Amino acid sequence: ESRVQWVHDWSTDGRVLVTLAGPGTRQRLAWVSTTDGSVATLKEFDPSTSIAGSARVSPDDKYIGYAMHEPEEGTGPRPSRQFIYVLPTDGRQAEPLVMAGWSLNPIWSPDGTHLLYTNDEDAMIALWCVAVREGRADGTRRRLTTRIHPGSVIGITGKGQYYYRPLDQD
């Protein structure tokens, strides 16, 4: 039996939700119909990996950007790495988009040409972006801020204003 564990985003038309679903540790990204509740698997993950944070639908509903925990060999302060991937919603294979640092919180620009994300590559969390064309990186990524507080993304407005919820700073 499969159950929805987390709702990540809506399609642009509101007809389907992007969810993290699965029995036990076998996670999968899936579309769930808002009209009849049917579930269509988009990607099933290996038990050693998992979605980290959010998965976001592109404005044209053709792609889902997500961060994924991946196991890392050796010892250290972190048991895994987090990279950004783009998954076509038509069933093709996910493409790695950002394979650097501890990447998290992907969200699409309003026009769907860029994916913004947070990254701690330089030992400070900053907001970065990469141009995306047909589900792949189109050019080099660039830093947009020098530092932001750790947190989770809320959204981005039509004018490109980025909103996130900082974690408690106790």
Image (cartoon, helix red, strand yellow):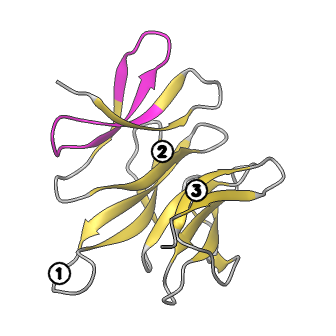
User: Which residue carries the number 3 mark?
Assistant: 153
In depth, the one of 17 and 151 nearer the eye is 151
Instruction: Please state which amino acid type lies under the numbered disc 3.
Output: Val
Say which mark, if any, is on residue 73: 1
Residue 33 included in the magenta stretch of the image: yes
In depth, the one of 148 and 42 nearer the eye is 148
Residue located farthest toward the front when viewing the structure as drawn: 170
Instruction: Please state which amino acid type lies under the numbered disc 1.
Output: Glu
Please name the residue shown 52% across and 71% down the image.
150
SS type, badge 1: loop
Of the residues under marks 2 and 1, which one precedes in the sequence?
1
In depth, the one of 70 and 151 nearer the eye is 151
Residue 15 included in the magenta stretch of the image: no
Please name the residue shown 36% across and 60% down the image.
68
SS type, badge 2: strand
Residue 121, image x and y in percent?
Answer: 49, 84
